[in-house]
Amino acid sequence: MTALVTGGAGFVGRHLVAQLAAAGGPVRVLDVAPRPPEFGDDVDYRQGSILDAEALAGAMAGVDTVYHLAANPHLWARDKSVFHRINVDGTAAVLSAVRQAGVRRIVVTATEVILRDWRSNSPEPLTEAEPTPPASAMAGPYTRSKHAADRLVREAAQAGLPVVSLYPTVPIGPGDVNMTAPTAMLRGFLADKTPAFLDCRLNLIAVGDVAAAHILAAEKAAPGARYIIAGEDVLLSDLLDWLEEISGRPVPQRRVPYWLAAASGHVGTFVADHLTGRAPMGPIEGVRLARGRWPIDGGKALRELGLTLTPARVAVERAVRWLLDDAENAMPIV
């Protein structure tokens, strides 16, 4: 039974494709990026966009399970419309194609940051039972687009589409050639390009565990089910201690208050939007998300799916080793 992975050349996507291929089943990928060199001949790779109706329909033919990961995962883009186009319109196109093709199961990758107002000061752990926040509670264009896409998925589930939603926290590990926000953060600290930090709580999960959760959800979850895929809550200050111990490199020691980080984020985002066109080091959406970091409860996935977790420290070490040693896949740290 063929599995289709949209966005299979992305960070989580590569790990998911590797696990599916290792299990021996036919794997097909639809992604706009060129074929990753590590994909073997057993992967049916199709370079194309989920917004291309013909390419999407062709990729969907004969498929049993769809893993929809294709998205713009970054926290800044000069053209803000790209978030809605890829994350919302793209999800709508995939849901429609799944419906037309009669696919048995679709697993959609969302993000836990859309499940609570970023301004919330609640000390309560975040769970799947959290009341759905309004779009106005999102921290910026990226989260607004993922919130809108999630609404489409919930509506499709209510209409009977066999869809399962996953809400991963912060994936960490090797192979992030696209430098998503968590890996870019680690790289900035290792390269000594981040002089200070806003201490906050991050929930870190090994990227391989996120991929495994997708497969378990396709096998075990009921249609319409929703799961937070979470690892360990770690203070950023503790993460920095890990980075220094693992790499032997100095890390920043100076903490900054939220108001200063937010001011810097606003200025950096304005400069990026209107002057340089290059991604800021700390976009304001990312700063806002760091402010509202509450405890995460991922116990439902552990109980119902049988997900097992890699220690966060191990995941961080794998990411750091890849960043420092794998020059072919990682941008050099200078």
Image (cartoon, rainbow, N blue to C red):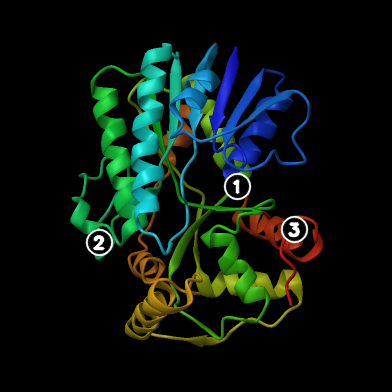
What residue is disc 2 on? 122
Tell me: 39 left or right of 195: right
User: Where is residue 271 shown, x and y percent of the image?
Assistant: 41, 80
* Marks 1,2: beta carbons within 8 A: no
Looking at the rendered image, the quarter that the N terminus falls into is top right
User: Does 47 sit above or below residue 148?
Assistant: above
- Dot in front, 1 or 2: 1
**Which of the pair 144/247 is nearer the observer?**
144
Q: Nearer the viewer, mark 2 or mark 3?
A: 3
Which numbered dot is residue 322? 3
Give x and y (percent) for residue 92: 34, 32
Residue carrying label 1: 11
At mark 2, the secondary structure is loop
Q: Earlier in the sequence, mark 3 or mark 1?
A: 1
SS of the residue under disc 3: helix
The amino acid type, in three-letter code, at marker 2 is Ser
Residue drawn at x 69%, y 52% is 174
- Secondary structure under tag 1 reads helix
Residue 48: x %, y % from top left: 56, 34
Percent x, y for residue 202? 47, 62
Foreground residue among 130 and 306: 130
Mark 3 belongs to which amino acid?
Answer: Trp
Please name the amino acid that badge 1 sits on: Phe
Side of 137 relative to 190 (left or right): left
Spatial CA distance of label 1 from label 2 is: 31 Å
Q: What is the spatial separation of the Cα atoms under label 3 and label 1, in whole angstroms? A: 13 Å
Residue 122: quarter of image: bottom left
**Disc number lying in front (3 or 1):** 1
In the figure, 199 relative to 109: above or below?
Answer: below
